[in-house]
Image (cartoon, helix red, strand yellow):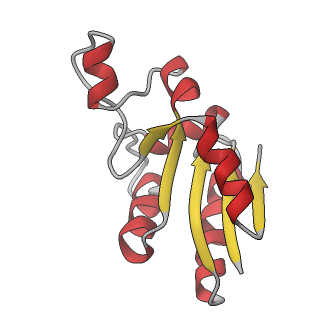
Amino acid sequence: MRYGILLLGAPYSSQAAHSAQRFARAVIAGGHQLDSVFFYHDGVYNASRLSAPPLDEPHLVDGWIELHREHGVQLDVCIAAALRRGLMDQEQAERHGKQGCSVEPPFQLTGLGQLVDLGLRCDRLVTFAP
């Protein structure tokens, strides 16, 4: 079965991001395919390269990156929600005249069309919200 995840919660402010990451690992361990995680609303903070939780807590940003590297899961971030919250990749930083970028690769800024496409091509789109 093909799955997609829609994550609306910021890391460390609710259980949503942690639960979504555990669900993603369980989906893959169960032999299913996880196509993409789409980060929307405050969920875009999961893509922040500036996240630095205490060492005794799970590093959720690194966890998403590991999921991408180990299983090729696409990490899509809503560009409009990200820009509103001060998150941008190098291309957007240059476009908006900012000196630095704050989105960690392999997260990719994209539009809501990607979310619609994810919903169409997956058997299940599971939402995690605060």
- Within the image, what quadrant is residue 99 found in? top left
Image quadrant containing the C terminus: top right
- Figure check: 123 above or below 27: above
Q: How many marks?
A: 0
- Nearer to me, 55 or 95: 95
Residue sticking out furthest to the top: 97
Instruction: Pinpoint residue 7: horizontal percent, then vertical percent.
Output: 67, 49
Q: Residue at x 51, y 47 (%)?
A: 76
- Nearer to me, 10 or 95: 95
- Nearer to me, 95 or 106: 95
Instruction: Pinpoint residue 127: horizontal percent, then vertical percent.
Output: 77, 53
Residue sticking out furthest to the left: 99
Residue 95 falls left or right of residue 120: left
Instruction: Pinpoint residue 61: horizontal percent, then vertical percent.
Output: 44, 52
Q: Residue at x 38, y 27 (%)?
A: 88
Image quadrant containing the N terminus: bottom right
